Image (cartoon, rainbow, N blue to C red):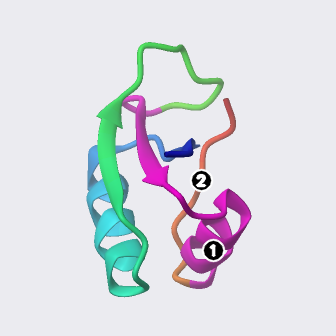
């Protein structure tokens, strides 16, 4: 099973992102990251399985979910 992380930042955005991806048929889980992110925020990521990270990021972008850079 392929796994990819999409860094989100806040738990609120991560929860919203998970629901958006679910509505598009993409299974996702919220994970607390241990890495220090360059941006302000709590340090959360969305873990996606067997899906294209680029596709998931495109969907989230269309729904105005700001992604954090690692």
Give the mark nearer the N terminus: 1 vs 2: 1
Is residue 28 depicted above or below 69 in this figure? below
Which element is circle 1 on?
Answer: helix
For the point 56% across and 45% down, the residue is 2
The magenta segment: 41-62
The answer to which image quadrant residue 26 occupies is bottom left
| Residue 70 percent location from the top left of the image | 67, 29
Which residue is tagged 1?
Answer: 61
Inspect the magenta stretch and tell me whether residue 60 lies in it.
yes
- The front one of 48 and 8 is 48
Question: 59 left or right of 18?
Answer: right
Which element is circle 2 on?
Answer: loop
For the point 42% across and 48% down, the residue is 46
Question: 36 left or right of 9?
Answer: right
For the point 39% across and 65% down, the residue is 17
| Residue 57 percent location from the top left of the image | 64, 65
| Residue 62 percent location from the top left of the image | 61, 84
In the rendering, which numbered label is found on residue 67?
A: 2
| Residue 21 percent location from the top left of the image | 41, 74
């Amino acid at each position: 099973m392929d796994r990819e992380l999409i860094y989100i930042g806040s738990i609120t955005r991560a929860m919203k992102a998970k629901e958006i991806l679910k509505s598009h048929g993409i299974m996702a889980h919220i994970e607390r990251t241990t890495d220090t992110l360059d941006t302000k925020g709590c340090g959360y990521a969305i873990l996606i399985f067997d899906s294209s990270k680029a596709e998931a990021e495109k969907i989230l972008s269309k729904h105005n979910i700001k992604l954090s850079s690692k």
